[in-house]
Amino acid sequence: MLSKRSAAFFLKSLNSSQLSSEAIRNGFVGMVGRTPLVRLNKVSQETGCEILAKAEFCNGGGSVKDRAALFLIKDAQKKGQLKPGGTVVEGTAGNTGIGLAHMCFAMGYKCVIYMPNNQSQEKIEMLKLLGADVRPVPVVPWTDPDNYNHQAKRFAESIENAVWTNQFDNTANKRAHLETTGPEIWQETGGKVNAVVFGTGTGGTLGGVGTYLKEKNPKVQVYLADPQGSVLYNYFKHGKLERSEGSSIAEGIGQGRLTNNLKDTPIDDAFLIKDTDAVEMVFRLLHEEGFFVGASSGLNVVGAVQAAKLMGPGHTIVTCLCDTGQKYYGKLFSRKILEEKGLLEAVPLQYRSSLHG
Ligand SMILES: Cc1ncc(COP(=O)(O)O)c(C=O)c1O
């Protein structure tokens, strides 16, 4: 406990010399980016590489998608599509919606979210809590005009002062990572980064970071880590938009087409990551490193380990921890659900104390 006098002195010194303007974040919007770059000690030791991860769960809305959300809104403002009091409309079932909803509260906009009607009640409630008008619609493929993304677009077009932010094909998403995540990784590693590896949903993270770092140093290797059931691994390996076998427990990643945000990304190689490996890593990250993260983060770190094996010891490999495990508590940390999906065996026996149900 600090005495009254020393507490007063501490506060005074904070107010005067120690608080530089750099240290102060400007409201919620200022809580986007400049996330810590952390060394994952155990996997670094095992591989002989420096395996580093941007802790993206430290963004204000709790995920990597806050960066995209901010840049999508800024893009609409710049293009004159969004004036004060306007409405932001997006088709999303996850983190982009959460990021946009936070941002709308902070910036004075309304938020409308279209999502497939097979999403968990928890997600719907969370978005409602954040002020969004949530519209669950029947699950139909992208090719159907009633797909949730197309409905979001039509709705935005039907009202005044509204924008469909279009996270998949609006490259303001990729620009967020070209202008923030990529430069942060370059600066924080002192330009010593040898490779980056990310799973992709919209492709914004991999597209933006990969493009930026390749321009800084063409020798930086850019790797895609793709989950089961996505088409991207086969596309980059064999030039075919064909789904890999199975489906994945990881939310937010995996793709059925080549989005504008991923197009033209300078990808050097791709890894197909099994759910069993991603899930095992989620529990290793928790028990061995202390990080409580979701499955896409586990998959990213498995990708980083594969990159380390490919490149050999002595390299610096960067990925990200996309969001926390809290959102997936009911699924990824449920013994019953993991068992149903054939994933229980993937959780190391000694780490199963973290399961419920
Ligand atoms: C949990 C999670 N991880 C990873 C990603 C992938 O990011 P990106 O859309 O930039 O490819 C997303 C995207 O929604 C996500 O929600």
Image (spheres, rainbow, N blue to C red):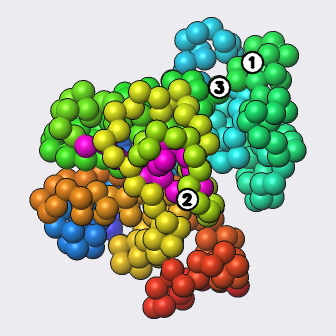
Snapshot quadrant of residue 236: top left
- The type of residue carrying mark 3 is Thr
For residue 218, what is the image quadrant?
A: top left
Labelled disc at residue 162: 1
**Which residue occupies 83% across, 23% down?**
155
Q: In this view, does 162 lie above or below 286?
A: above
Q: How far apart are marks 3 and 1 (CA)?
A: 9 Å
Q: Give the range drawn in magenta.
A: 221-235
Circle 2 is placed at which residue position?
A: 228
For the C terminus, give its image quadrant. Answer: bottom right
Which element type, helix, strand or loop, lies under badge 2?
loop
User: In the rendering, which numbered label is found on residue 165?
Assistant: 3
Mark 3: secondary structure: loop
Whole-angstrom CA distance, mark 1 to mark 2, is 36 Å
Picture coordinates of residue 144, whole percent (x, y): 81, 33
Left or right: 9 in relation to 126: left
